Amino acid sequence: MASETLDVVELLLTAEIYNSQNELIVNDLPSKIRRALWDSKTRNVAKPIKPNKTMIRNMFSIEDVENALKVNGKPFAYAAVDTYSGSVRITEGSLDSAAEWFKKQEGARDRIFENPVLAYYYGSVAEEKDSNICYQEVASKNPPKEASREWIESIIEELSEDKGNGREWLKLAYIKAPEEVRESMDELILTERQKDELQKIELAIKNKEHFKNIGLYDIGKVLFVGPPGTGKTSFARALSKKLSIPIVEVHLSMITDQYLGETSKNIDRVFALAKKFDPCIMFIDEFDYIATSRTASDEHSAIKQAVNTLLKAIDNTSLVEDGVLLIAATNHTRKLDEAVWRRFDEIVDFERPTLEMRKDILDTILRRIEGDIDTASIAKKTEEYTGSDLRMVVREAVLSALLDKRYNLVQEDLESAVKSFDRRSGLKMTAFIQE
Ligand SMILES: Nc1ncnc2c1ncn2[C@@H]1O[C@H](COP(=O)(O)OP(=O)(O)OP(=O)(O)O)[C@@H](O)[C@H]1O
Ligand SMILES: [Mg+2]
């Protein structure tokens, strides 16, 4: 069966079932269908869905809808196109027959396992229920609406309508939808403690209501501490993907302004911005840029004021009430004063990877590269290297293999990449000392 035909029939079945089953909600729609029918004002896909020719043309790039709905040269028996209104739907009383037909087609199973609405029908509604199809399982794998770009766009749209304000706020942060995030947890090698922290964060998010009920509001503020290149930013982004909530990335250097008072205002703005994206991760990078010790020699009152604003903004942000999971990252521990530390309920250390971790990181990076490499031996030669350093080594090795007209890697490529990396960082060190 032409995949075009299956595309259209899947849409028609999904619409019919979604419209008739009260339990089904917007998160049960597969992202492709949700995106096409998304209403940014209500941030929802309203019931009933009424597929029509234009919608189908746009969704699947199908020119001739009638033709796409042909089976063996004849019009599909269980659907009709209304010539006047252009509406397309399963004909009255034909849902079961249409669904039965659909299920028998090649490739239909894969579609059902990616479409909670269909899974619901075949697993719990159909005359002959299929015990191999579990709605809950399919639904749990379907990304929720908050994971999509259109979710973010709807909020941005609303902010932009709020003349002046909202538009200005958007310049202070990068906002990414989970479906756009490249980093993923299974490509990060974590320490046992980091894995524990990850679990705690997930539990806190899932049990927000519980924390509210028992009156514990002080959760969901996490500080990542560690040298450059140890995976802090990657972890925050991968978390956004894992939890399917957007990430609002703030660089403190971006919001500090030369004008007195403007920095403080920007801090308030960016926190207000994050709260609009409930639920989301607010990731504050370069945290030490502003959260420096207030008691130190720094007499500059503008900075002090900004630090106080930042601390107050952190106090006034809550995962339980605002849906904002706050993650701040810093390279320096010494620069942060006691008042800052106190505000975080979890501190996660990002250390330079151990021997074992370095091997695992190398194995992960090399996963898709051809070549039989003894990564344990490279791990031994890369003490003090961070994950980011190891990535650079592999990139260097790949490039030199390409110079040699090879797509695969041999041990020697990596060995010499390590040597040249050592040489380079050696140079960097001397330059630094001479400065
Ligand atoms: N533990 C790790 N496992 C796998 N990859 C890692 C690990 N640590 C770092 N990397 C890789 O190194 C690169 C840089 O990491 P990242 O930018 O997250 O570091 P960072 O701690 O945020 O650094 P900075 O403090 O400079 O912002 C990423 O591509 C990441 O995949
Ligand atoms: Mg970073």
Image (cartoon, rainbow, N blue to C red):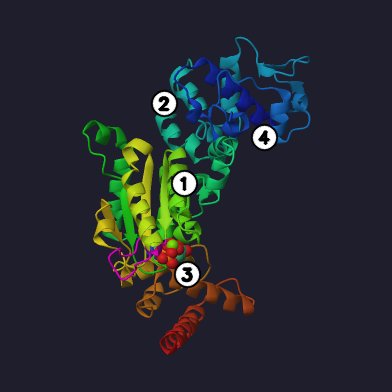
Give the number of the mark in front: 2 or 1.
1
Residue 269: assigned label? 1
Foreground of the two, 330 or 123 = 330
Instruction: List x then y, in percent, for residue 354.
Output: 31, 70
Q: Quadrant of the N terminus?
A: top right
Looking at the rendered structure, the kind of residue marked 2 is Ser
Foreground of the two, 165 or 115 = 165
Mark 3 Cβ and ligand 1 under 8 Å apart: yes
Magenta span of residues:
286-300
Identify the residue position indicated by label 2 in the image.
131
Looking at the rendered structure, the kind of residue marked 3 is Arg
Looking at the rendered structure, the kind of residue marked 4 is Ser
State how far apart marks 4 and 2 are (Cα).
Answer: 26 Å
Give the prevailing secondary structure in the magenta stretch.
loop
Say above or below: 124 vs 274. above
Residue 203: assigned label? none
Outermost residue toward the left in this view = 214
Q: Is residue 364 visible?
A: no
Q: Is residue 247 visible?
A: yes
Instruction: List x then y, in percent, for residue 282.
Output: 42, 48
Say above or below: 147 vs 135. below
Identify the residue position indicated by label 3 in the image.
391
Q: Earlier in the sequence, mark 2 or mark 1?
A: 2
Q: Residue at x 37, y 74 (%)?
A: 376
Q: Is residue 295 magenta?
A: yes
Crowding at mark 1 (Cα within 10 Å: few <14, some 14-19, many 20+): many
Crowding at mark 3 (Cα within 10 Å: few <14, some 14-19, many 20+): some
Q: Residue at x 51, y 26 (%)?
A: 117
Q: Residue at x 51, y 48 (%)?
A: 175
Identify the residue position indicated by label 4 in the image.
3
Q: Earlier in the sequence, mark 1 or mark 3?
A: 1
